[in-house]
Amino acid sequence: MNEKEKIKEEEYKRQIYLLQLYREQIEEIYAQMELIERFIGEYSRAIETLQELAGIEEKDALMPLGGNSFAHVEIKDLKKVLVNVGRGIFIEKTLNGAIDFMNKKIEDLKKSEQNLAKTAEEIRLKMEELSSKLENVQVS
């Protein structure tokens, strides 16, 4: 092999490697988007629960204990709830304040998801372009 042919083969291998990196990036992005969807679902369910509890003085409920086990509990004060604002810090909020906070979180998560989708699309276009180039290349 002469020097020029080695470079061509090395370049081909580099582009194949780059294509694999793009695939891995897209998989990571989709995993992040899936996680965001789960968070959005959790916030949405919490909002629905808070809306159902609004205006009720006392309420019997089932409290999840983990491992698909529950305990019967009586909720006595529904005027305020504790909301996790991050890093294990909880703030007491009114029901409406908690709902507003969670709606803002959902909005922020949706923006993040849109940005991730845009990035994934940009990477997908690069992959298509690179794949097309690789199909038309003859390695020497």
Image (spheres, rainbow, N blue to C red):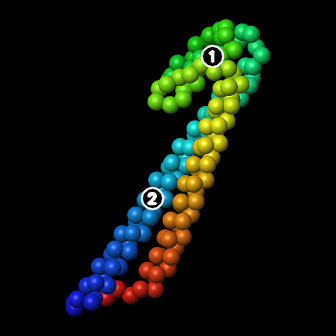
Q: Quadrant of the C terminus?
A: bottom left
Q: Using residue 50 as the reference point, say whether residue 90 is left or right of it.
A: left
Graded by Cα atoms within 10 Å as few (under 14), some (14 to 19) or many (20 or more), the crowding at tag 2 reads some
Disc 2 residue type (three-letter): Gln
Residue at 32% over, 85% down: 8
Vertical side of 79 occupied by 119: above or below: below
Graded by Cα atoms within 10 Å as few (under 14), some (14 to 19) or many (20 or more), the crowding at tag 1 reads few
Residue 7 versus residue 97: which sits nearer the camera? Answer: 97
Residue 127 versus residue 110: which sits nearer the camera? Answer: 110
Q: Secondary structure at mark 2?
A: helix
Residue 2: x and y in percent read 22, 91
Vertical side of 42 occupied by 68: above or below: above
Instruction: Identify the disc placed on residue 25.
Output: 2
Q: Quadrant of residue 39?
A: top right
* Whether residue 62 can be seen here: yes
Q: Secondary structure at mark 1?
A: strand
Q: Using residue 129 as the reference point, say whether residue 95 is left or right of it.
A: right
Disc 1 residue type (three-letter): Leu
Residue 139: x and y in percent read 35, 86
Vertical side of 1 occupied by 90: above or below: above
Vertical side of 14 occupied by 84: above or below: above
Residue 26: x and y in percent read 49, 59
Q: Quadrant of the N terminus?
A: bottom left
Residue at 43% over, 80% down: 134
Residue at 61% over, 53% down: 114
Q: Earlier in the sequence, mark 1 or mark 2?
A: 2
Residue on which the image places disc 1: 62
Counting every numbered tag in the picture gives: 2
Instruction: Identify the disc placed on residue 131.
Output: none
Q: Name the mark nearer the viewer: 1 or 2.
A: 2
Residue at 47% over, 26% down: 88
